[in-house]
Image: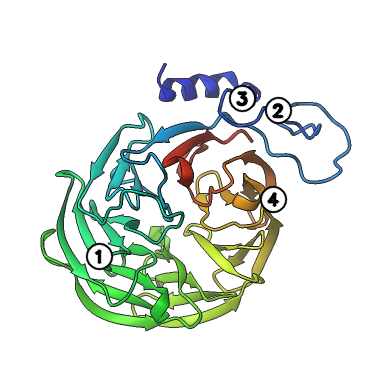
Amino acid sequence: MGRSSFFALSLLAGPACAGLLACSGGGALRPPTSDNQADDPCDPGGGGTNTGPAPAVDAGAAPVPLPGGTGGIGFDDLRFSPTLSMLLVPAGRTGNLDLVDPSSEGISSVGGFSSAATYSGNDSFGVTSADEGNALVYAVDRTSNTLAVVDPQTKAIVAHTTLAATPGYVRYVSPTNEVWVTEPSMQQIEIFTLGETASTAPTHAATIGVGGGPESLEIYAPSAAADAGKPAYAYTHSATAVVEIDVVARSVAATWPDGCATSKGIAVDSTNAWVMSACEEGMVVVLSMQGATLGTATVGAGVDQIAYDPQSMRLYAPGPTAAAMSVLSLSAAGSPKVLGSVQTPSDTHCAVTNGGGSVFVCAPSAGSLLFIQDPF
């Protein structure tokens, strides 16, 4: 039975059935555990006294091996493109940008990036970040310091340009039809104007200084007709703060301390105008786009990149130190609440969701993704 059929049956069967199926184990991880709480998906109605954080449950994580991944891959950035209905998986030292169908788990690889025979144990080699815009994919290679334009139909690099410094993250900026690349070693974001055709290389347009950063990058574009004409912003981090950048003016508009000792991943809810900031020490902070703190929640330490589903208002935060991914729900007012956590490998630090409780996390040492169905 395909996963799409399974999901349909789960919806008909109801949340209780879905929770039991998710906690049936069957993966390579430890057997499921229970915190004996009534809301525990692995022990519904169990009741009892909560003496601390609930143990992570085994959600039956299913491996999705990537071509050439045996021996490990230095993952960093994972994205989902609604336009392509594909996960964008920069597969580091394999030399590939992998396009993964989240329904069938079919994989198409785009080669031509820097490659190495062995995994060094970090995420500093080869293609490490990608984003989609206008049905093209923009990817950065940390070894060659290049920005590539990928045609996902022909599965080929059709143009590339040299960057000013080693790249961090790349994002397509729809309000201005530009591509922005973070360059932490220069404490700047480099902006590129796109060519008239896919095969025309992007050209350098400007840089924006971000002292103490930039770390991560997300774009806020007004999402409703009623919001038309409102400013568009980019959000990134300095070491201990969220930095808001006016996309059109190409300048820093505001800086807000986020309470982090070390700020890492960032996510944006364009409908509710929220910014979610992940702290490496093990905390998630939600802010309004006026800089007010809406709430905080404690998650596993070592948190790096996070994933957010705006439809369900759920946030996924892998914490390598805890070898678990925290699952959080945001209230209508933006306050985060930890629903529980699921077991992950001890080096899982990045995640992506295509919605519907479907989450893929990176497993660097295994050179694969892991599929997890949200059990909460």
Which of the 4 image quadrants contains residue 287? bottom right
Question: How far is disc 3 from disc 2 in space, using C-alphas?
Answer: 10 Å
Q: Secondary structure at mark 3?
A: loop
Task: Work out whether mark 4 precedes mark 1 in sequence or the reverse, and give the earlier one.
Answer: 1
Determine which of the numbered discs, if any, sits on residue 359 in the image: none
Q: Is residue 80 above or below residue 251?
A: above
Position of residue 241 relative to residue 123, above or below, is: below
The numbered dot on residue 25 is 3
Horizontally, residue 25 falls left or right of residue 45, namely left
Tell me the amino acid under the disc marked 1. Answer: Leu
Contact between marks 1 and 3 (CB within 8 A): the answer is: no
Q: For the point 75% across and 34% down, which residue is it?
A: 39
Q: Which label lies toward us, 3 or 2?
A: 3
Query: What residue does disc 4 label?
Result: 337
Question: Dot 4, how many residues are within 10 Å of its Cα: few (below 14), some (14-19), or many (20+)?
Answer: some
Relative to the observer, which residue lies in front, 6 or 324?
Answer: 324
Kindly identify which numbered label has been placed on residue 42. 2
- In this orientation, does residue 274 appear? no
Can you see residue 12? Answer: yes
Which is nearer the N-term, disc 1 or disc 3?
A: 3
Which label is found at residue 147?
A: 1
Q: What secondary structure is found at the residue carrying circle 2?
A: loop
